[in-house]
Amino acid sequence: MQSGLARSVVRFAAFAIVVLIALFLRYPSQFLDPSIGTESLTFHVRQFAEDGFASLLYPVNGYLITVSRLFDVLALAISPYAAPLFASAFANAYTVLILFAVWRAPTRLRSPLLCALAPLFIPIQPEPFAVSLYSFWWSAVGLALTLFWVAGRSRTWDIAAIVLAVTGALSSPMGIVYGPLFMARWLRDRTQFNFALMVAVAAPSIIQLAIILATDGAATHPGRTFPVTGIIRETLGYFVPVLAPFSPRADLAYTVIGFLFGSALVAAAAAQTKRFDFFFWILVLLVAGAAAAYLMRIGTDVAHPLLSGGRYFMLPFIFLSWLVLYLIAEMPGWLRAGSIAAIAFSWVLATPYTMWRTHDPLPWASHIRLCKEHGDVQIVGQFFGNADAVWRTSVTQAGCRFMVGLNPLNRLIEPYVPELFAARTAPYEGGQLSSALVIAAHGWSPDGFYSMDVVASLPDDIRAFGSHIGGDAATGDLVLEFGHEPGEPTVFLMLVGPGEREALLELEYPDGSVRTMTPASRVPGWIKLEIFSHQTGVHRLTVRDIGSGWGEWAALAFASPERRGTN
């Protein structure tokens, strides 16, 4: 007994190591510098800060993604300062457990070890890997796995199947799509287990459907189309990525590849007509259902597995890999090995797009500390991976204090959270501005930018510098020096023109350290820019206009130290 348990532990540990290495290779930055972004920030973080644990019941974009929200909420409850680390750890552990179940659970899948490893290498962007938000996609994999379950081998595994079914249906709308398959499984076998499995999927799916119908969960991409060539290309052709996505006539080539690959699957199936069992058709319908789900939402030619929206191809490609392995399992050894090698080689060709995703570091913990100490701020998270194109959401000071106060250990962590140069922005409604001394104005001038009527409305003791100097877009730096005392913000005004980016702010502290950030400034008219620092003394602020839009410009207003008689 003990030796068997030891072997099981070693087997699981070895498998977990392999999975974690693969996840690291796909998205190393999520291991080295974990992040939270996009809908996790907008829905999970903000709603937990506002409504606490009740937010676990809230939908995201029109349906429940319970597993994803649970991981983010638990991470925030443990420590908002380290929430990205815990959320990523939960996501990775969940992925390991789902794939271990694919390998070791009693199912009708053929080549189960390869079925467990294939999802780690499917040719899509790395965005669904090691990210808590996308854990609900992995829950759909666990849900689908239970369709192949062989009951009665182990009570533990049978309970695990019910858990996978319930969590999968509560975390993904795919329970609605695959519900008829669970009914078909019960009608075929008429066992108590399959009836329980059907109910375990049906009950949460009814809840999901009600939420979808009551919200915007059924919203679709405007102008979606469904050309046959596009469907063949996206559901079959991109699975064998032998060409770079920007190759000449790539769309036509991948349509042909998809037709040839689909023909090969039909030929392989026709050669095994006696193997057309119930589970073969389940796999076919899993692929079709997953493809139909994303096509009905966005249509064709909107997402690309290697370029944008790779998550939409995750389920179709995973189930397609299972179908391929199911078909070739009965082939002669040389043909089976050759088929696997050919597909694997095409996946290797796509590694420049599927591996080694990185993102710029963002001062998450410092934003939480700033929010707790100084009031409402915008927390930033990952979007495209670039520090100058981040995802933001507003969190109140009360919300940040609530999250930090859940765990007394946060008081021990807080002194080690680095101070942040952060700027809180809000519409300007009057009030005194801080004074600053202009040190340099490369490409900036007091009267060289648009909206001078707005500038004219400022008080006489306010100076305004703008970066517009003609041409397509403004560039250059404005360098200011100002005194600062901890506890009170330094207040300037900021105005940004119709460019593609916002101005980049760089603050040099009295101790010589330098930090940068891009404040939110996309509101009409002047906004109040409040700068916080924990250091006393002269600070140097550089406002760098990095916009590239036509006619883009930026402006900054502050009190004049010369007119106030200060230096």
Image (cartoon, helix red, strand yellow):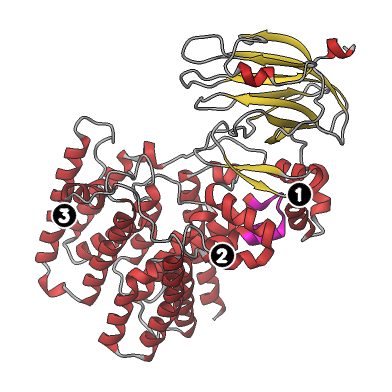
Q: Earlier in the sequence, mark 3 or mark 2?
A: 2
Question: Is 124 colored magenta in this rendering?
Answer: no
Q: Are marks 1 and 3 in contact (CB under 8 Å)?
A: no
Q: Earlier in the sequence, mark 1 or mark 3?
A: 3
What amino acid does circle 2 point to? Tyr
What amino acid does circle 3 point to? Gly
Q: For the residue carrying disc 2, how many other residues have a C-alpha within 10 Å: few (<14), some (14-19), or many (20+)?
A: some
What residue is shown with label 1?
A: 397
**The quarter of the displayed image where residue 302 is located:** top left
What residue is shown with label 3?
A: 262
In the drawing, does residue 207 fall left or right of residue 507?
left
User: Bounds of the magenta span?
Assistant: 73-83
Q: For the residue carrying disc 3, how many other residues have a C-alpha within 10 Å: few (<14), some (14-19), or many (20+)?
A: some
Circle nearer the viewer, 1 or 3: 1
What amino acid does circle 1 point to? Gln
Mark 1 to mark 2: distance in Å? 22 Å
Q: Up-down: is 447 above or below 486?
A: above
| Callout 3 secondary element | helix
What residue is shown with label 2?
A: 58
Image quadrant for the N terminus? bottom right
Closer-to-camera residue (420/215): 215
Mark 1 to mark 3: distance in Å? 56 Å
| Callout 1 secondary element | helix
Image quadrant for the C terminus? top right
Q: Are marks 1 and 2 in contact (CB under 8 Å)?
A: no
Q: Is the magenta region chiefly helix, strand or loop?
A: helix
Closer-to-camera residue (104/260): 260
In the drawing, does residue 395 fall left or right of residue 297?
right
Instruction: Examine the rendering and report whether any part of residue 321 can be seen.
Output: no
Q: Position of residue 361 (x, y in %)?
A: 61, 36
Circle nearer the viewer, 3 or 2: 2
Instruction: Examine the rendering and report whether any part of residue 159 can be seen.
Output: yes
